[in-house]
Amino acid sequence: MATIDVTEATFEETVTGEGIVLVDAWASWCGPCRAFAPTFEAASEGHPDATFAKLDTEAHQGLAAALQIQSIPTLMIFRDGIMVYRDAGALPPAALEDLIEQVKGLDMNDVRRQVAEANSARDAEGQ
């Protein structure tokens, strides 16, 4: 599956659905972003069961700010609407493949439990 572009209008709908969504936040002037692009594109071809999205941080500065993207490229991975990975920096192909396989292997019931516990603890601290 080829990559898709996400915008302010399509980002939330893209990442909150079921399944795995990888988002590459990039800019055309960024050398590491340009170097990572073929790796990201190749991974999209090898994993048609996942959605691979590109976020142009220059064209969508408001969304990049809302996501608190401070370094690019930044890779975010969502599974079933939950962000399970976020880090800045270009990954080599083998590392990206390993990361995708780890995300596919996640026990999402356990992830949802951990998110609920973290939210409860945060709420308790705020009271």
Image (cartoon, rainbow, N blue to C red):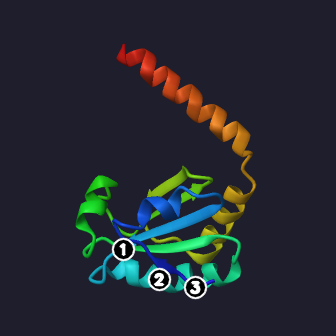
Of the image marks 3 and 1, the number of the one nearer the N terminus: 3
Q: Residue at x 36, y 67 (%)?
A: 9
Mark 3 → mark 1, Cα distance in angstroms:
17 Å
Residue 57 in sight here: yes
Residue type marked 1 = Trp
Q: Secondary structure at mark 2?
A: helix
Q: Secondary structure at mark 1?
A: strand
Q: Is residue 94 left or right of residue 122?
A: right
- Asked if residue 27 is positioned above or below residue 25 in the image, the reply reads below
Q: Position of residue 123 (x, y in %)?
A: 43, 21
Q: Secondary structure at mark 3?
A: loop
Of the image marks 1 and 2, the number of the one nearer the N terminus: 1
To which residue does mark 2 refer?
A: 37
Question: 12 or 30, which is in the foreground?
Answer: 12
To which residue does mark 1 refer?
A: 26
- Asked if residue 37 is positioned above or below residue 70 in the image, the reply reads below
Mark 2 → mark 3, Cα distance in angstroms:
12 Å
- Contact between marks 1 and 2 (CB within 8 A): the answer is yes
To which residue does mark 3 refer?
A: 2
Q: Position of residue 124 (x, y in %)?
A: 44, 15
Q: Residue at x 38, y 78 (%)?
A: 32
- Asked if residue 7 is positioned above or below residue 108 in the image, the reply reads below
- Asked if residue 91 is positioned above or below residue 81 in the image, the reply reads below
